[in-house]
Image (cartoon, rainbow, N blue to C red):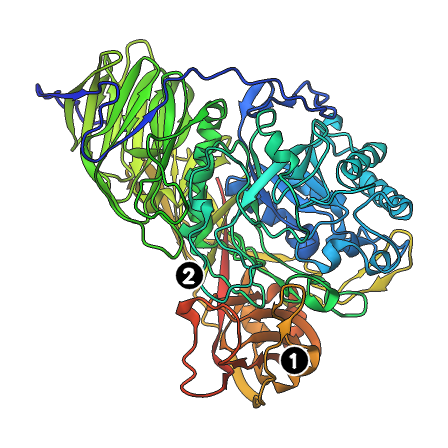
């Protein structure tokens, strides 16, 4: 790498007087001088936490530990039984590449024992194989064993034959005998896969959203479930329960986990909701409002009284939202990503998402739905098949914009989470009193001693925030104070970011930066590369510890002297232009070189850290990327051109092949063996497409020179224009009025008989044109109430109209393309009392209803395999 000669430090001295209590116009202050107390030893009875190789897991009252060091992992939910088993390995690797450390999954009882005594752990229900593949992908696992899961599944996952015969969610003897048998089955699936065995199962969640109290319930029930889990061999380091909505549990036996969502699809309002508290920093409580528990609490829960003796862990921060019939909330990538500075700045020490990967519900043995619905007494009406959840990874593995927005934060936690975890939350001198205060600045600091991070959020979903004009932050730390930036800046509506305070970069003190730290790449003797991301609309500047020789081509170097608390002199680097080059180079006597790269926000969203050709590398690509063994897999939806950039450069010329599905060999269903029962065939979302069913062709991979410090490559696959024909076969009839009722006393999904009013279209997609592609996404653009996709009379997928794009992957159902598919659309009535985003509300033009298919596309999905 060629570094430009060091610029001469300007003689000008910028003085920043930081007297205690001083706050000029536009100055936002936090006093973080109070000593950080040592974390209390959590009074938690963990399971076996030592692996055979000596690795340990633990916790204290503030954070998790791994081998004795602070650990702040990222957890994402992925339901194995809602995804074809043939996709698991690739999807788990995609999650790993997205920065997920732990995969969590519900065990949905009625997916495994729909008929009493006949357990099914095969095919898409093979929990053991799922855990093994997660381990292979480098992920730890938390298994949420229920027995009540919710998960928008019928009866919360408890089989019909149980619900019909006995009390549930209590210590009823008949019920508990069945739970003992269920847990025994799960224990057999996990045998040898637990942390104590050298496996990756590190946690068990008991029950879900449990706030029921009374004889044989409450504390007694959770305690009894834990005893049954241990009896079944599920001896793991961590036992958790969900901590919201007044949850009740035996203190010390389990750890509460928390969550928050940017809207309430389970709500009953047909209008936009007031600003959600999910976007406001939390200084006094961990429970973020209503999270949709289906039972009512009558007093504050155990999680509230335990908050000083348990760490603040997350499990269900919404990485998306489901569509409920009555309320169809669409969220943007910024609606989701802006929650991260808020939750981390509020003290969260495990960032857990629900859902991170979408899926599709299996059908019952009889072909009916297993979804939550008012017909089965549920509080919500969800789609029969689709469990898309607007997740970062769609049901067919497609990468969505929200994943790109989240990944820089995951990289930040991997690189700096061990420093953040011990830090405590510091409240500003002034903060919003209520979530609907859209004027007062929203920010917080987490610090320990004289080091910390500043968290800022100026985004609230569906509401404009006041721009914070001419703003500086005045942070009083132990022994010194920091004012940043050196000159006031405007923080625009929609901005959110994390800035460092006295961050140690391999022995060089970064006093502050107005850019977000993303990752560190340790290259041994060659030095360290620190990657930052520019904050939109804010000039980039770095204040670096004095004594270092700083080079910053194109930027301005000056001297920054701080006075107040303690005097310090720093090299101020201002005017940094974000990009892929070495923005700042630091040479230190007796130390390794330090290189600082400041990417644009858009470039940072394309950044991954991958293990490739025997070492960690930075990877930049707009394509979906993950590593499989020693190969880099790149996936592109709709564009046959691939481009990626790596640093450090690869030593040899990599080779590339394209991989595509053998579309002629896929089958429409599968036959599985059932533990404890005869073989049977079940209509489901099971794909019989095997991982090895692919064809490869050599592709010319072109070296495209350098982009800053990155070595770039390009490849182009043959472009495919896929054709689909659509013909209307049935006109819509007048739809019945939407009924108000159910336990929510709100709009309920139409009865099955009402679908006689649906219009229908026939879709033809010639299968032969799809050969050589990794997948093809059928994209259906419709306006109506409910859309359903069929092959003959077999329901493949369904969708509530919301304005969010409906896509269906054809690879898993390739054999069905030999006959036309059918999409039916139930008309949406103009008087339907449901919530639709204002952007999606159709123009009825004076008509009573609407049912249209505006178009159908088949989007090719290309895959490129690069081997160094």
**Above or below, 169 relative to 597:** below
Picture disc at residue 639: 2
CA distance for labels 2 and 1: 28 Å
**Marks 2 and 1, the one that precedes in the sequence:** 2
**Above or below, 697 relative to 509:** below
Picture disc at residue 21: none
Q: Residues within 10 Å of mark 1 (few under 14, many from 20)?
A: some
Q: Residue at x 43, y 60 (%)?
A: 640
Q: Residue 767: x percent and y percent?
A: 59, 73
Quadrant containing the N terminus in the rendered view: top left
Q: Residue at x 41, y 44 (%)?
A: 434
Q: Residue 516: x percent and y percent?
A: 34, 35
Asked whether, in this view, residue 524 is left or right of residue 162, the answer is left
**Residue bearing the label numbered 1:** 819
Q: As rendered, which of 594 and 312 lies closer to the eye?
A: 312
**Above or below, 322 relative to 142:** below
């Amino acid at each position: 790498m060629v570094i430009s000669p060091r610029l001469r430090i300007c003689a000008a001295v910028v003085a920043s007087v930081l007297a205690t209590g001083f706050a000029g116009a536009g100055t936002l202050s936090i006093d973080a001088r109070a000593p950080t107390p040592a974390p209390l030893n959590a009074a938690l009875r963990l399971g076996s936490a030592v692996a055979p190789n000596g690795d340990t897991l633990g916790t204290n009252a503030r954070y998790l530990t791994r081998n004795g060091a602070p650990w702040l992992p990222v957890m994402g939910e992925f339901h194995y039984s809602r995804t074809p088993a043939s996709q698991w390995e690739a999807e788990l690797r995609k999650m790993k590449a997205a920065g997920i450390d732990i995969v969590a999954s519900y065990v949905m009882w009625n997916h495994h024992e729909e008929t009493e005594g006949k357990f099914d752990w095969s095919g898409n229900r093979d929990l053991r194989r799922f855990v093994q593949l997660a381990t292979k992908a480098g992920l730890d696992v938390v298994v949420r064993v229920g027995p009540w899961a919710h998960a928008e599944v019928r009866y919360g996952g408890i089989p019909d034959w149980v619900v019909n015969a006995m009390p549930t969610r209590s210590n009823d003897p008949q019920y508990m005998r069945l739970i003992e048998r269920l847990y025994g089955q799960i224990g057999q699936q996990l045998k040898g896969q637990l942390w104590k065995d050298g496996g990756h199962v590190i946690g068990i969640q008991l029950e879900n959203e449990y706030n029921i109290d009374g004889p044989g319930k409450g504390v007694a029930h959770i305690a009894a479930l834990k005893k049954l889990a241990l009896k079944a061999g599920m001896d793991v380091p961590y036992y958790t329960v969900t901590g919201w909505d007044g949850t009740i549990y035996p203190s010390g036996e389990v750890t509460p986990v928390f969550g928050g969502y940017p809207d309430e699809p389970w709500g009953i309002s047909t209008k936009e909701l007031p600003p959600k508290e999910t976007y406001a920093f939390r200084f006094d409580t961990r429970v973020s409002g209503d999270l949709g528990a289906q039972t009512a609490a009558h007093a504050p829960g155990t999680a509230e009284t335990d908050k000083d003796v348990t760490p603040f862990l997350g499990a269900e921060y919404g990485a998306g939202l489901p569509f409920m019939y009555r309320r169809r909330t669409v969220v943007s990538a910024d609606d989701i990503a802006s929650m991260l500075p808020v939750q981390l700045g509020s003290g969260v020490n495990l960032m857990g998402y629900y859902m991170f990967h979408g899926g599709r519900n299996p059908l019952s043995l009889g072909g009916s739905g297993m979804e939550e619905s008012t017909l089965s007494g549920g509080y919500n009406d969800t789609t029969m098949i689709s469990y898309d959840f607007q997740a970062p990874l769609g049901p067919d593995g497609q990468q969505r914009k929200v994943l790109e927005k989240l990944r820089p934060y995951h990289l930040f936690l991997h690189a700096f989470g061990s420093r953040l975890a011990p830090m405590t939350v510091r409240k500003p001198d002034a903060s919003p009193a209520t979530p609907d205060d859209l004027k007062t600045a929203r920010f917080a600091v987490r610090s320990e001693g004289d080091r910390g991070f500043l968290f800022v959020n100026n985004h609230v979903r569906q509401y404009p925030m006041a721009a914070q004009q001419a703003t500086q932050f005045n942070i009083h730390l132990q022994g010194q104070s920091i004012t940043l930036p050196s000159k006031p800046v405007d923080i625009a509506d929609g901005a959110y970011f994390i800035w460092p305070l006295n961050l140690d970069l391999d022995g060089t003190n970064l006093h502050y930066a107005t850019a977000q730290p993303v990752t560190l790449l340790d290259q041994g003797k060659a030095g360290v590369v620190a990657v930052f991301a520019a904050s939109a609309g804010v000039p980039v500047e770095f204040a670096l510890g004095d004594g270092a020789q700083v080079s910053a081509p194109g930027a301005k170097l000056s001297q920054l002297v701080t006075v107040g608390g303690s005097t310090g002199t720093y090299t101020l680097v201002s005017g940094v232009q974000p990009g892929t080059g070495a923005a700042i180079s630091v040479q230190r006597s007796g130390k390794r070189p330090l290189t600082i790269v400041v990417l644009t926000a858009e470039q940072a969203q394309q950044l991954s850290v991958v293990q490739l050709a025997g070492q960690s590398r930075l990877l930049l690509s707009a394509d979906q990327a993950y590593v499989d063994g020693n190969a880099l897999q790149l996936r592109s939806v709709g564009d046959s051109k691939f481009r990626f950039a790596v640093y450090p450069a690869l030593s040899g010329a990599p080779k590339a092949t394209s991989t595509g599905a053998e579309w002629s060999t896929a089958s429409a269903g599968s036959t599985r063996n059932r533990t404890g029962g005869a073989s049977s065939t079940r209509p489901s979302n099971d794909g019989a497409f095997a991982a090895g069913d692919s064809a490869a062709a050599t592709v010319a991979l072109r070296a495209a020179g350098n982009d800053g410090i990155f070595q770039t490559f390009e490849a182009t696959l043959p472009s495919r224009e896929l054709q689909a024909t659509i013909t209307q076969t049935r006109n819509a009839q007048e739809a019945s009025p939407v009924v108000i009722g159910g336990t929510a006393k709100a709009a309920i999904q139409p009865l099955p008989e009402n679908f006689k009013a649906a219009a229908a279209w026939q879709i033809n997609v010639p299968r032969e044109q799809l050969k050589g592609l990794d997948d093809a996404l059928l994209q259906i653009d419709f306006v109506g109430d409910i859309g359903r996709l069929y092959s003959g009379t077999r329901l493949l997928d369904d969708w509530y109209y919301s304005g969010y794009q409906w896509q269906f992957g054809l690879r898993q159902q390739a054999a069905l393309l030999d006959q036309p598919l059918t999409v039916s659309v139930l008309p949406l009535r103009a008087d339907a009392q449901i919530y639709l985003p204002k952007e999606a509300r159709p123009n009825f033009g004076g008509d009573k209803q609407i049912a249209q298919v505006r178009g159908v596309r088949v989007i090719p999905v290309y895959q490129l395999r690069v081997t160094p």
